[in-house]
């Protein structure tokens, strides 16, 4: 039979007493504050700051602050990006750039990308002078060759075609080659529109402005 001799619920029940060999050590608020201020920014703090300062989602910020050096590189990119809305740069960092880094078995900061050239490349896409698909190809070539975005775009003739006269010629050829899809679109089958747009993109080597192409095809079919 087990019989309880006495209960121990509080500190006094354990009969603690100060060790006479240990000196009293008082930790003041100033000392605590000083230690806090001397600590480097922790990942959770950096994540919250990225969300607040750059208006990023927690998910996007979480990817960018995954490692200290990647976070430093990402912040430099975000700071140097001239637009007030940093979302475009963040999308490129966690999208095409991270994909390139993974393919090359590197971290983001190890890619050696020129931030000014990256910003320039994003600008081509934002001005609708370059398709997003071709822009990703240009990024790969920039990393491989060290050439500027503009040099590669000029060399490969990748500037997006927005001239309606040139696009109309391509659309005419595509409709002639795909009469069934054109008739399907005329009869209300909207999936045929994206097929025709895709054929125009293919015939133009990805250079046609897809938004303008879509509008021109719809107008052509409506007026047929």
Image (cartoon, grey):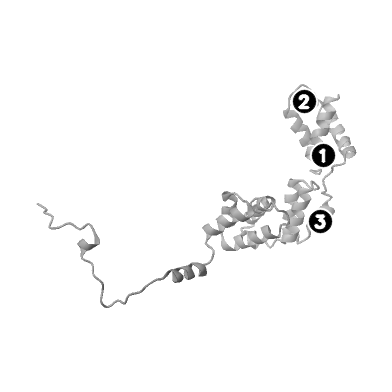
Q: Which residue is mark 3?
A: 150
Instruction: Give the Cα distance between marks 1 and 3.
Output: 23 Å
Q: Between 38 and 216, which is closer to the camera in this rendering?
A: 38
Instruction: Give the Cα distance between marks 2 and 3.
Output: 38 Å
Q: Residue 18 shows which numbered tag?
A: none
Is residue 16 visible in the rendered image? The answer is yes
Decide if residue 22 is on the left or right side of residue 154: left
Q: Residue furthest left?
A: 1
| Mark 3 element type | helix
Specify few, some or many for label 2: CA neighbours under 10 Å numbering under 14, 14-19, or 20 or more: many
Q: Residue at x 74, y 46 (%)?
A: 132
Specify few, some or many for label 1: CA neighbours under 10 Å numbering under 14, 14-19, or 20 or more: some
| Image coords of residue 26 (percent x, y) | 37, 72
Q: Which residue is mark 1?
A: 203
| Mark 1 element type | helix
Q: Residue at x 79, y 59 (%)?
A: 148
The answer to whether 28 is drawn above or below residue 87 in the figure is below
Quadrant in which the C terminus appears: top right
Res. 82 image quadrant? bottom right
Q: Residue at x 77, y 24 (%)?
A: 184
Q: Which residue is mark 2?
A: 185
Q: Residue furthest right?
A: 165
């Amino acid at each position: 039979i087990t019989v309880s001799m006495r209960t121990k619920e509080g500190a006094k029940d354990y009969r603690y007493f100060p060790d006479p060999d240990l000196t009293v050590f008082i930790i003041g608020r100033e000392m605590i504050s000083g230690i806090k201020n001397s600590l480097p920014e922790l990942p959770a703090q950096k994540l919250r700051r990225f969300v607040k300062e750059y208006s990023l989602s927690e998910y996007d910020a979480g990817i960018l602050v995954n490692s200290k050096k990647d976070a430093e590189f990402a912040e430099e990119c975000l700071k140097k990006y001239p637009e007030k809305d940093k979302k475009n740069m963040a999308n490129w960092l966690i999208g095409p750039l991270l994909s390139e880094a993974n393919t090359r078995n590197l971290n983001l900061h190890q890619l050696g990308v020129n931030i000014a050239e990256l910003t320039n490349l994003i600008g081509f896409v934002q001005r609708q002078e370059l398709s997003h698909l071709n822009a990703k190809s240009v990024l790969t070539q920039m990393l491989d060759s060290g050439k500027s975005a503009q040099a590669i775009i000029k060399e490969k003739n990748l500037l997006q075609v927005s001239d309606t006269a040139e696009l109309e010629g391509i659309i005419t050829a595509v409709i002639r080659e795909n009469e069934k899809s054109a008739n399907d679109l005329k009869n209300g089958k909207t999936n045929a529109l994206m097929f025709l747009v895709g054929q125009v993109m293919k015939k133009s080597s990805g250079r046609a402005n897809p938004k303008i192409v879509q509008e021109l095809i719809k107008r052509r079919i409506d007026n047929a």
